[in-house]
Image (cartoon, rainbow, N blue to C red):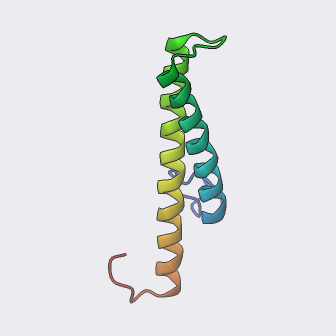
Amino acid sequence: MADAKRPWWQMGNTPTWGFVFGGVWTFLAVLRWGNVAVGDSGFLGMTAQVIVAVLSTLLGGFSLVSAVRLRRLRRAERDPATPGN
């Protein structure tokens, strides 16, 4: 059983760590996409470079979305009258 306090979609423990992880993964994705654009296959091969770039992009995006959602939830808990939550 999962802990009821932690949603299944949460990638970090706090919004700050979610933004940090999201930034790191997004930075790595940009580097990988740069390798793909230049045509540098490295030791992995071009197909593996594209796969790693896609996975890094997804992890960065999911981490950032998770951090924003967690931040909005915590803000809504503090001020339940906030519209749009």
Q: Residue furthest left?
A: 84
Residue 52: % across, % down: 55, 25
Q: Nearer the viewer, residue 84 or 48?
A: 48
At x 60%, y 56%, the residue is 18
Q: Nearer the viewer, residue 56 or 10?
A: 56
In the rendered view, tell whether residue 1 sits above or below residue 51.
Answer: below
Q: Nearer the viewer, residue 4 or 55?
A: 55
Specify the quadrant that holds the C terminus. bottom left
Residue 26: % across, % down: 55, 44
At x 49%, y 13%, the residue is 47
At x 61%, y 37%, the residue is 28
Q: Name the side, left or right, on which 69 lies relative to 14.
A: left
At x 54%, y 50%, the residue is 63
Residue 67: % across, % down: 54, 60
Residue 71: % across, % down: 53, 70
Task: Quadrant for residue 3, please give it.
Answer: bottom right
In the rendered view, tell whether residue 70 sits above or below residue 24.
Answer: below
Task: Quadrant for residue 25, please give it.
Answer: top right
